[in-house]
Amino acid sequence: MITSGRPRSPCWRRRPPCRCSRPIRGRFDLAIDFTPDEDLRAALLTRASGARFRGGFRAAGRQVCFSLRGPGADPRRHVLDLNRDLLEALGVPAKTAHPVLFVTAGERGAAQARLAALGAATPRIAVHPGGHYATQRWSPECFAELITLLTGRMGAACVVLAGPGEQELCRRVCAATPDALSPGSATVREMMGLVASCDLFIGNNSGPLHIASALGLPTVSVMGPTDPLRFAPRGAADRVVRRDLPCSPCQRARCWHHTCLRSIEPEEVLAQAEAALERLLPHEEAR
């Protein structure tokens, strides 16, 4: 596996795809671009990879970069369905309707020891205040108020998770409430172990949200500009809190008023968390 960071600097966006493709050029026989929109960088990278077989959506002119052309990308469909459509069009069976992830016994044991050291009793709730864009993030103060409510009314132990570059968000949440527990920095696999050792996940639209759902954890997500019909987790125990406004979902990375998130009260998220745990805990006690 070759991973590549995506710095937010405009300079990175101006780099020619041929330069960005150097780590992968000539190393693969098949390249698939799952990007369905008008951003052509991934399509150009796929072309510059030199792979003999290159597949992607027939959308926004990006199909000229592919030797295997998939279907059009219907913007009204969930991304999981779009990706399955693309794979099946390329001859790859894609039967799984919901992503599934697992952690090892060692990862779970290490996470549980880490949580025990924090004094995190049950129920445990993983809280992730981060998100790629600022417009996707509910405020740290709202998360802190929610944690206070969860601890006071439900006796929950709230574990605040932070990914790379999110330590300041975590610090602001923890500074605003004495009830927040911070396990410190963690790798992706360590974070997965921590999430899998909790009973519920609460966060914005982010990678950890979808990881939690794929691990089988009930989730409550706070969504602002994100279209839940396209991007929300679709597990039976996944819940979304959002405000239906004339301007949402706008899918924008910038906004001057943030009304869609600022109008969501911690009590609304608390109600969804209580409902999720009420369904879960009787089952857990019976096991």
Image (cartoon, grey):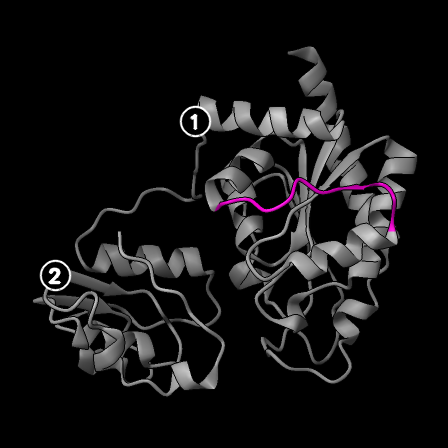
Horizontal side of 95 relative to 214 (left or right) equals left
Residue at 48% across, 29% down: 107
Residue 138 quadrant: bottom right
Of the residues shown, which amino acid type is indicated by label 2?
Arg
Query: Which residues make up the magenta segment?
Result: 177-187
Label for residue 104?
Answer: 1
Of the residues shown, which amino acid type is indicated by label 1?
Thr
Residue at 33% across, 58% down: 3
- Height in image: 142 above or below 7? above
Residue at 78% across, 60% down: 140
Q: Chief secondary structure of the magenta span?
A: loop
Label for residue 91?
Answer: none
Residue 22: x %, y % from top left: 20, 72
Residue at 69% across, 12% down: 286
Residue 72 quadrant: bottom left
The quadrant of the rendering that contains the C terminus is top right
Horizontal side of 257 relative to 94 (left or right) equals right
Sequence-first tag of 1 and 2: 2
Horizontal side of 59 relative to 132 (left or right) equals left
Q: Is residue 123 visible?
A: no
- The secondary structure type at the circle numbered 1 is loop
The residue to which callout 2 is attached is 27
Few, some or many C-alpha atoms within 10 Å of disc 1 (few <14, some 14-19, many ≥20)?
few
Residue 76: x %, y % from top left: 49, 69
Residue 241 quadrant: bottom right
Residue 62: x %, y % from top left: 27, 81
From this viewpoint, which residue is outermost toward the top?
287
Few, some or many C-alpha atoms within 10 Å of disc 2 (few <14, some 14-19, many ≥20)?
few
